[in-house]
């Protein structure tokens, strides 16, 4: 079980491949990402990854009516990461981020409870609806990928 939330979700190739590999092994993965951002470009890039992730059974939820600023990952109710890192290129290789890695059920369970509460204010991305989104949205999302390395 993996739960992840990030204010900016622009996964590197390695991050996306790791999520897909885990999902293909049968790991249940839920992502909580923003539906609002101070960067329209990052939102287009974020959404450009949805089709592939959804095809592999990864559940994606967009936080509604508020800015998502939390950044955390919890794996198997044991391993947790909380900190300043987003799930993006800048955090992965450029920014000086600080994260705490915590082993133990107590913190992981608390994060899971918080994640489930936050998810109540989120909209699940339906794979069928996503596939049928407008051609204009698809073009904006795919064309924005050329900028993902600087986000």
Image (spheres, helix red, strand yellow):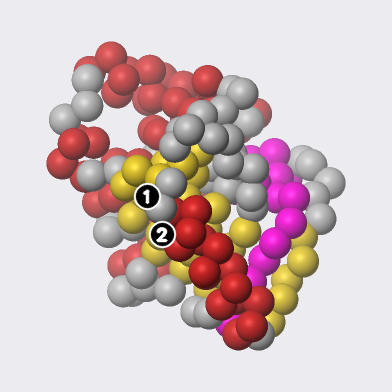
Q: Which residue is mark 1?
A: 60
- Alpha carbon distance from label 2 to label 1: 6 Å
What residue is rendered at 41% in x and 53% in y?
120
Please say whether residue 87 is one of the residues in the magenta stretch. Answer: yes
Q: Magenta segment range? A: 78-93
Quarter of the C terminus within the rendering: top right
Q: Which residue is mark 2?
A: 30
Residues packed near mark 2 inside 10 Å, few (<14), some (14 to 19) or many (20 plus):
some
Quarter of the image for residue 57 reads bottom left
Question: Observer-nearest residue: 57 or 3?
Answer: 3
- The answer to whether marks 2 and 1 mark residues whose Cβ atoms lie closer than 8 Å is yes
Work out which quarter of the rendered image holds the N terminus and state it: bottom left
Residue 144 in picture, x, y percent from top left: 46, 22
> Which residue in the rendered view is the most extreme toward the top?
136
Q: Secondary structure at mark 2?
A: strand
* Element on which disc 1 rests: strand
x then y, percent, for residue 85: 70, 50
Residue 79 x, y percent position in the rendering = 61, 77
Which residue is at a point 40% across and 34% down the rendered structure image? 47
Please determine whether, in this image, residue 30 is positioned above or below residue 76: above
- Asked whether 116 or 70 is in front, the reply is 116
> Residue 108 occupies which quadrant of the picture?
bottom right
- Mark 2 or mark 1, earlier in chain: 2
Give left or right: position of 148 versus 63: right
Q: In which quadrant of the rendered view does residue 132 lie?
A: top left
Q: Could you say where residue 56 lies in the image, as x and y percent from the top left? A: 28, 57
């Amino acid at each position: 079980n993996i739960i992840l939330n990030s204010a900016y979700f622009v996964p590197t190739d390695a991050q996306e491949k790791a999520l897909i590999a885990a999902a293909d092994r049968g790991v249940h993965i839920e992502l909580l990402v923003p539906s609002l951002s101070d960067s329209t470009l990052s939102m287009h890039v974020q959404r450009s990854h949805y089709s592939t992730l959804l095809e592999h059974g990864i559940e994606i939820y967009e936080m509604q009516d508020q800015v998502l600023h939390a950044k955390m990952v919890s794996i198997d109710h044991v391993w947790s990461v909380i900190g300043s890192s987003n799930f993006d290129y800048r955090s992965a290789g450029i920014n000086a981020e600080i994260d705490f890695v915590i082993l133990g059920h107590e913190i992981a369970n608390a994060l899971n409870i918080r994640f489930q509460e936050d998810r109540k204010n989120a909209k699940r991305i339906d794979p069928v609806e996503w596939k049928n989104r407008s051609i204009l949205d698809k073009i904006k999302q795919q064309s924005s990928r050329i900028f993902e390395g600087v986000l």
